[in-house]
Image (spheres, rainbow, N blue to C red):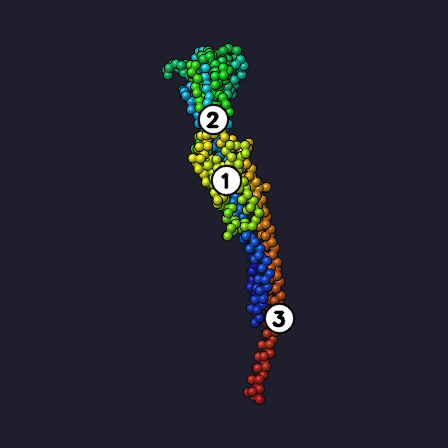
Amino acid sequence: MATSSSTSAIFNGNSRYSTDFQAVIERAAAIASLPISQLKAQKTDLSDQSTALASLDGKFAALQTAVDGIGRALGGSSFQASASDSSKLSVTLGDGATEGNYSIEVVSAGAYATSMSTAGWVAAPGNPHPYKLSLNGHTYSVFALDNSAGAVAGAINSQFGDKVRATVVNVGSASIPNYRISLQATTLGDSQPDLLDGNTSLQTQQTLGAQAHYIVNGSGVDVLSNTRTVTIAEGITLNLLAADGGTPTNIAISRSTSALSNALETFAAAYNSAVDEVDKQHGTSPGALAGQSLVSGLSRVLSRISTYSSGGSQLGGLNSLGLDLDKTGHLTFNAFALLGADLTDSSGVAAFLGTASGGGFLKSVTDSLASVEQVGSGLIATAKDGVAAQSARIDASIVDQQGVVDRMKTQMQERLAAVDALIATMEQQYNYLSGLFESQQTAARQFG
């Protein structure tokens, strides 16, 4: 931060001692400014510490991001599905999906109920009629701007578009148009969409709606749905396309090892970067944070992460996933070791890693990193707050101390200026008397 100037106007005097007086002022100011120099040195140290903390913060934040990446690699995006007949259904996977085989018998993909105006639409003159929409035995008032087909269809879509979609179609020719309103329910089932003018029906039912009908894994349990998008297990959603004619469609869900492999490789790199950043703060050429408990605290956190083990798992430690800890404290990743573990016991790998909130390695690492990054209480966060507070106090002390020095210099200049003026006056008197005496001596020699 900016501080007040440590120098004042140079002392200007008229006596022969003015230069000496200036030297006295500068010497006194230099001595009085020693505490300021010490404070500025402390400020420089704190600035170096702040830079080191920011760098550590970035490395540990990157490590947390890498840990989050492992969690995502275990989510729905890491799974893949294959269906024996893609013309009958499609599969969408999400978080919670697990590996396995499923059998789906699509008895019927269902149908959306439709209707169309019985006669060509003629817009009645005058005020809008009291139109009503009938659906599933319920009626809803439709408020149109006028009686035109377009206005009525637009009112239906804007007011009840979540229940039915209305379109205006021309069943005639270009020269002799025949406009009608077509209604289609937005959900499967026999909803019998109808448009009423008062109590008079204007529509003819075209398609008898039906719910989708399917059976999961040969259970014999008939499942009916008013949508073709159905969830048969956590994270596994199907879009039913057509009936299978009694031949079930087989679905195989498997998890790709490549996503997890990439995530673990990224994790190892982020972990090693964090280790290197902590190592900069100790050793033969320690950094700005050398000797602080923060450094040993961060080292312990990293050690807990790299030596994690699960007693209840057959995998044991990270080395079972291809993450080996070498003598330098760095992790190396072997993708082939992970592939072998995943092929042998994929569910065991997923259980060992767990989730950030549910347990396992991810829970342990997330908690450890929270002790570092948690705002207000984490190791780095607390250290950064402490450095910022110290820096602010030093800035205030520098301003105060500089004020003391400036006032002292001003007072010395005022006092020495008075002394200098007195000496200058005495020097003038001396010079006058000396000149007068020399004149008398000269006169005496000439006329004596």
- Tell me if residue 266 comes above or below residue 256 in the rendering: below
Q: Is residue 412 visible?
A: yes
Question: Would residue 51 be seen by someone viewing this image from the given angle?
Answer: no
C-alpha distance separating marks 2 and 1: 28 Å
Q: Callout 3 environment at 10 Å: few (<14), some (14 to 19), or many (20+)? A: some
Task: Report how far apart the C-alphas of labels 3 and 1 lie in the structure.
Answer: 74 Å
- Judging from the image, what secondary structure is the residue with disc 1 in? helix
Which is nearer the N-term, disc 3 or disc 2? 2
Please report the residue visible at 58 percent of the width from the left and 76 percent of the height from the top: 431
Residue 411 circle label: none
Q: Residue at x 57, y 69 (%)?
A: 20
Label 3 to label 2: alpha-carbon separation: 101 Å
Please state which amino acid type lies under the numbered disc 2.
Glu
Picture layout, residue 313 above or below residue 241: below
Q: Position of residue 347 (x, y in %)?
A: 49, 29
User: Residue 195's x, y, as percent?
Assistant: 49, 14
Under circle 3, the secondary element is helix
Residue in view at x 50 percent, y 13 percent: 196
Disc 2: CA contacts within 10 A as few (<14), some (14-19) or many (>=20): some
- Residue linked to disc 3: 422
Question: Where on the picture, by quarter, is residue 311?
Answer: top right
Q: Indicate the secondary structure of the residue bearing disc 2.
A: loop
Q: Which mark is residue 99?
A: 2
Decide which of 83, 40 is in the foreground and name it: 83
The tag on residue 63 is 1
**Which label sits in the foreground, 3 or 2?**
2
Q: Earlier in the sequence, mark 2 or mark 1?
A: 1
Q: How many marks?
A: 3
Dot in front, 3 or 1:
1
Residue type of the residue flagged with mark 3 = Leu
